[in-house]
Image (spheres, rainbow, N blue to C red):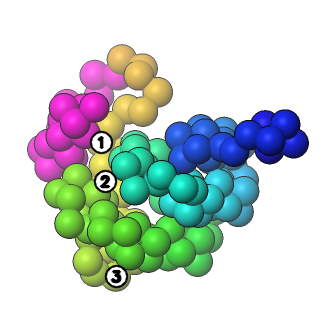
Amino acid sequence: MIEGGGSPNSNTWEILAEAHIAEKRISDALSCLIKAFKTVGSKSWKLKPIKLAAFLKLCRDEDDMESAEVLIELLRQSGYHKDKVYASLIGNDELSSTIERIDDIVDGENMDDDDDDDDDDNDDDSQVVFNQVDSSF
C-alpha cells in the first residue's frame, strides 16, 4: 500500500495490530497501534475496547508490562480515560490494577463466541462494560 503511494489509515493499522496480537507479536502490535494514533485523521478513530483488552491480556500473559504501559499512557494522553468504557479498562491507577481489571473482563467474557454455560457467575461489572461497548458501535 505504501509502495503504491497510499497511506494506511488508523483502521488499517488497527487491523494489522489485531493480526499481530493473534500471532502473539507484542512489539509489532504495539508499533501498529502507535501508528494508528499518529495517523492523519486519527482524531475521529478510537481503538476498539475488545482489541485493547486483547492486547493488554497478551502483555500480561507474555509478561511484557512495559508494552502495556506504553499503550495505556498513549490512551491517557489521547483522552481515553474520560470515556467510561475505556476508563473501566485502563483506569487512573497502577498498571497492576488495570491488568487485573482486564483479566476479570476477558475471563468473564468468552471472546471466541463458544457457548459455555459455565460462565453464569460472570462479574456484573464486566457484562456492563461489554454491553456499553456493543451499544456504542
- Residue annotated with mark 1: 108
Q: Label 1: few (<14), some or many (≥20) within 10 Å?
A: some
Q: Which mark is residue 94?
A: 3
Q: Position of residue 99 (x, y in %)?
A: 40, 66
Q: Nearer the viewer, residue 11 or 86?
A: 11
In the depicted structure, whether residue 43 falls above or below residue 108: below
- Residue annotated with mark 2: 104
Q: For the point 28% across and 57% down, which residue is it?
A: 86
Question: How many labels, in total?
Answer: 3
Q: Which mark is residue 126?
A: none
Give, as a three-letter code, the residue at label 2: Asp
Look at the image and tell me in which quarter the N terminus lies: top right
Query: Mark 2 or mark 3: which is in front?
Result: 3
Q: Is residue 74 left or right of residue 28?
A: left
Real-space CA distance between mark 2 and mark 3, rounded to the nearest whole angstrom? 16 Å
Give, as a three-letter code, the residue at label 3: Glu
What range of the chain is rendered magenta?
A: 116-137
Q: Tag 2, which secondary structure?
A: helix
In the depicted structure, whether residue 11 falls above or below residue 58: above
Real-space CA distance between mark 3 and mark 1, rounded to the nearest whole angstrom? 21 Å
